[in-house]
Image: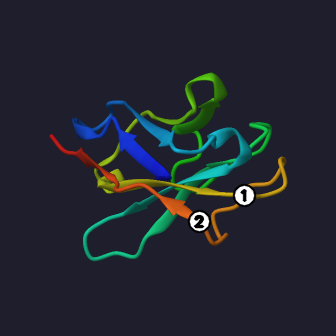
């Protein structure tokens, strides 16, 4: 069974940091472009960041540029989202997703094939 599992969410104070992980089971993430998305209560899901299967291309939403960093570790079959300088408006359920693309491509507007169940991130004092 092909699965993506997110972890690393939690409650953090404004200005704090969290690192989310997206681990795959049943398939090799190395062949997939990975995206991170989030959905806050009452809002539509939005793209946060993505990384190509080669790891050489990344994209970020304007709202997180300079604060979030996406990376991948093929040996661990895992993709990470390092989130620094967190703000209350970053509060949401964060999801990772996978799609097969040309190795240097990634995009948050793509139709993704596999999705995780999400992990809650709450930024509050």
- Percent coordinates x, y for residue 86 in the rendering: 36, 40
Please, what secondary structure does the residue beneath circle 2 have? loop
Q: Residue at x 32, y 30 (%)?
A: 16
In-front residue for pair 95/17: 95
Number of other residues with Cα within 10 Å of mark 2, as a class: few under 14, some 14 to 19, many 20 or more: few
Please, what secondary structure does the residue beneath circle 1 have? loop
Residue extending farthest to the left is 125
Residue labelled with disc 1: 100
Query: In the rendered image of this protein, does residue 4 appear above or below residue 37?
Result: above
Q: If the image is split into quadrants, where does the C terminus sit? A: top left
Residue extending farthest to the front is 1
Residue labelled with disc 2: 113
Query: In the rendered image of this protein, does residue 78 appear above or below residue 60?
Result: above
**Which mark is drawn over residue 29?**
none
CA distance for labels 2 and 1:
8 Å
Q: Coloring scheme of the render?
A: rainbow
Q: Report if the CB atoms under discs 2 and 1 are less than 8 Å apart.
A: yes
Instruction: Count the marks.
Output: 2
Q: Quadrant of residue 38?
A: bottom left
- Percent coordinates x, y for residue 90 in the rendering: 36, 52
Q: Residue at x 22, y 35 (%)?
A: 13
Q: Quadrant of residue 111?
A: bottom right
Query: In the rendered image of this protein, does residue 7 appear above or below residue 39?
Result: above
Number of other residues with Cα within 10 Å of mark 1, as a class: few under 14, some 14 to 19, many 20 or more: some
Q: Residue at x 27, y 38 (%)?
A: 14
- Percent coordinates x, y for residue 1 in the rendering: 46, 53
Q: Earlier in the sequence, mark 2 or mark 1?
A: 1
């Amino acid at each position: 069974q092909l699965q993506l599992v997110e972890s690393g969410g939690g409650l953090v104070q404004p200005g704090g940091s969290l690192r989310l992980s997206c681990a795959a089971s049943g398939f090799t993430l190395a062949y997939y472009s990975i995206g991170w998305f989030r959905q806050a209560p009452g809002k539509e899901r939005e793209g946060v960041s993505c990384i190509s299967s080669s790891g050489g291309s990344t994209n970020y939403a304007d709202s997180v540029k300079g604060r979030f960093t996406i990376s991948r570790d093929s040996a661990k079959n895992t993709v990470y989202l390092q989130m620094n300088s967190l703000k209350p408006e970053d509060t949401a359920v964060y999801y990772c997703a996978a799609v097969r693309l040309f190795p240097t491509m990634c995009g948050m507007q793509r139709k993704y094939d596999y999705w995780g169940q999400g992990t809650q991130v709450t930024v509050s004092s």
